[in-house]
Image: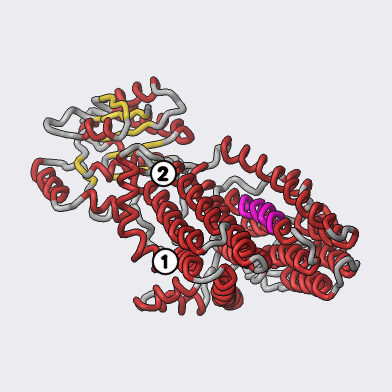
Amino acid sequence: MSIAIVTGPPVVGSSVEDDLRRLGFDVRPAADAADAARELTAAPAHQRVALVDSRFTGHLHALRLALTDPRFPAAAVTGALTVQAEASGALARAVHARASVGSAHSCDVAAANLPDLVADDLIADGIVVQRPELGVLVAAVPADATAHARARAAIADVDEEKVRLRSAVKARDGFVTTFFISPYSRYIARWCARRGLTPNQVTTASLLTALIAAGCAATGTRPGFVAAGILLIASFVLDCTDGQLARYSLQYSTLGAWLDATFDRAKEYAYYAGLAIGAARGGGSDDVWTLALAAMVLQTCRHVVDFSFNEANHDATGNSSPTAALSDRLNSVGWTVWARRMVVLPIGERWAMIAVLTALTTPRITFYALLIGCALAACYTTAGRVLRSLTRAAVRTDRAATALAHLADSGPLAEAIGKGSAHRASPPSAPLAPHAPAMSFAAPLFAVVGTAALIASVWVGEPGAWWPVLGAAIYVICAGRAVARPLKGALDWLVPPLFRAAEYLTVLVLAARSEVNGALPAAFGLVAAVAYHHYDTVYRIRGGTGAPPHWLVRMTGGHEGRVLVVTVVAALLHGTGFTLALTALALALALAVLIESIRFWVSSGAPAVHDESGEPA
């Protein structure tokens, strides 16, 4: 149980100790800093500890926001401070120092607001103390009866539960989510919180619902398609609910963030597979596996564009451009905000479209609409980001270059070529100034050339031909050259999505052109396994834990190694052999990446995170 040390003399009629017990704290009184120091010495080092002034007057949810959020090592509001284990040493030093000051002076230190003083000391010691946004919520330490009366009146004027429900919803969500889901899903989140359900349980329920929806779609019947559409919407409602429950009850966790991110992809792609199976069963001849795999490839590449651009620019210096300024101005015009959020086809709009089209039309029409919508959205977002990158004077950091290198997923072949190229290359004739933005386009140019050569050779080569192997060899060389230097150029964030498109499209085209029974479903499984590895890399980087271990990347061959293997297999094996080889590759990769991923996320000491940036694509 977490410990709350209430400092100062007791206040008659105060509810602060009861409020702390409601939040799960073991309350321990301390008359002054010396008593607080003794309580800290006796407290277990691994437990959360809070300091709260006995005169604290405010909303319970203000205390909850400050004292129970697991994402931050230290957090505070006026009159209340908490630290987790990693900052407990700094807290003990600060409180002991305050106790020493109090014993050396005759002033009445009991009258001081000890939590606020200690919070200032922690900041001076280099500890980041999170200050949650309270809005209209009250958190105060009244100095006299008049101030106390004003604080109590301010508390009475605020509907605390209404504020809590409103803050459970993301500030930036899509149109469908904001106006058709969140108005009632927040109440489902509250219902779950009051019954002790956790966000992870709701996330799992959302996954199971989506898998049942995929099973209904796989029946290939009209009632099955209608049921699938309804269940897909229900799954999305639960998908919104789990995040709202996490924000409502502050139940953030590392495992929960990972489950929420990966299950979203698993649900959508499993549903694509269900539609493809249903199309074949319903009509007997309508094979839409190519469309299903194309939709997965396009959607995954869209996400990689988002991830790469954000990683390249979120800590860049001098990060401004006329394009970004124009975007900010458009965001000040009401209708353009919703139009721009809808045009990128975020998950709410996309799933609503899929659900309605599944119920009313055919899987083929559903996939056509999905591909057209996602392609337009991809063109819009990518073009805007290219313009921003070309017009902004940004200097990318070493951390950003490392993140892009991990997202590139280069294997031993590309690494060897890259090291050889970097060793042989002469110093640049006009080196950049230390604070100048990098405008070299060599990396994306090599990635474009390699990708184009690979896709062209795969497209024109007959099934069983060796032209794709030659294209793969050129791709390996270009991939190595692309990562030979740190990815700090203006458009270097395009390198990972180009690599993803090259690898996924190679598998797609080879399977589609083979005309071998079962090749496309096997290719779907292979791309799904590789995509999981790439998503896992993204969310490890986002969680601040770095990329997957290097041995895993080398063992799976990197993107260039897998491309070479797939093209060689396609040239050597024909008929059912190609399907069996793709299936074996998919199972081997899935087993390797899943075992390592589950091991990491279950045992990880990564900080709890939660995406507050808005609805993902």
Q: Quadrant of residue 404?
A: bottom right
Query: In percent of the image, x 79 and y 69: which residue is there?
Result: 513
Q: Quadrant of residue 436?
A: bottom right
Marks 1, 2: nearer the viewer: 1
Q: In the rendered image, is residue 427 in sight?
A: no
Three-letter amino acid code at disc 2?
A: Ile
Q: Quadrant of residue 198?
A: top left
Query: In percent of the image, x 29 and y 56: which residue is there?
Result: 166
Q: Position of residue 197 (x, y in %)?
A: 38, 39
Element type where label 1 sits in the image: loop
Q: Position of residue 254 (x, y in %)?
A: 51, 42
Q: Position of residue 130 (x, y in %)?
A: 39, 47
Q: What is the span of residues highlighted in magenta in the rendered image? A: 524-537
Element type where label 2 sits in the image: helix
Main secondary-structure element of the magenta-colored stretch:
helix
User: Sequence-wise, which precedes: disc 1 or disc 2?
Assistant: 2
- Given residues 278 and 113, the one toward you in this image is 278
**Quarter of the rendering occupied by the N terminus:** top left
Q: Quick check: 114 left or right of 397?
A: left
Q: Which residue is mark 2?
A: 123
Q: Is residue 530 magenta?
A: yes
Q: Quick check: 205 left or right of 29?
A: right
- Given residues 10 and 502, the one toward you in this image is 502
Q: In the rendered image, is residue 480 in sight?
A: yes
- Given residues 212 and 12, the one toward you in this image is 212
Three-letter amino acid code at disc 1?
A: Gly
Query: In percent of the image, x 54 and y 59: which residue is there?
Result: 217
Q: Position of residue 161 (x, y in %)?
A: 23, 49
Vertical position of residue 513 compared to residue 88: above or below: below
Q: Which residue is mark 1?
A: 174
